[in-house]
Image (cartoon, helix red, strand yellow):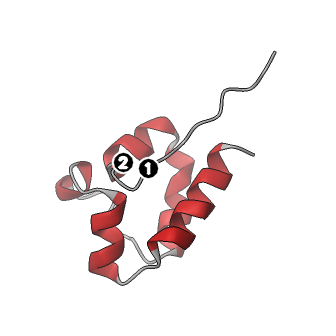
């Protein structure tokens, strides 16, 4: 059976991401995104969070997609 590939986009909200797999929080923490428990994070996209925190969005996206597709 072929494994389904998950593709996370920059427009994915932090809330959506955590619903897919809460263990991805470790990656967010590694990039300095500590506020994923706050209500605003439920609506904030990964791209918005990266911009606010000065994170390289492309590097973060690579790590997140690697996590979901390993």
Residue 49 on image: x %, y %:
31, 68
| Residue at 44%, 50% in the rendered image | 9
Judged left or right of residue 16, residue 42 is left
Judged left or right of residue 30, residue 1 is right
Quadrant of the rendered structure where residue 51 is?
bottom left
Which part of the image, by quadrant, shows the N terminus?
Answer: top right
| Secondary structure state at the residue bearing disc 2 | loop
Task: Name the foreground residue: 19 vs 59.
Answer: 59
| Residue at 36%, 72% in the rendered image | 50
Residue 6, placed above or below residue 41: above
Q: Which residue is mark 1?
A: 9
Q: Are the two marked residues, 1 and 2, in contact with CB atoms closer than 8 angstroms?
A: yes
Residue 43, placed above or below residue 58: above
Specify the farthest residue to the right. 1
Label 2 crowding class (10 Å Cα cut-off): few <14, some 14-19, many 20+? some
| Secondary structure state at the residue bearing disc 1 | loop
Residue 2 on image: x %, y %:
78, 21
Task: Name the foreground residue: 22 vs 5.
Answer: 5
| Residue at 18%, 57% in the rendered image | 40
| Residue at 33%, 51% in the rendered image | 11
Q: Which residue is mark 2?
A: 12
Count the marks: how many? 2
The answer for how far apart the CA atoms under marks 1 and 2 are is 5 Å
Residue 38 on image: x %, y %:
23, 58
């Amino acid at each position: 059976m072929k494994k389904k590939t998950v593709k996370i986009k920059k427009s994915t909200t932090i809330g959506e991401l955590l619903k897919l797999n809460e263990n991805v929080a470790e990656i967010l923490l590694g990039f300095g995104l500590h506020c994923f428990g706050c209500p605003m994070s439920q609506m904030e996209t990964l791209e918005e969070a990266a911009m606010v925190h000065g994170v390289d969005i492309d590097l973060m996206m690579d790590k997140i997609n690697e996590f979901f597709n390993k």
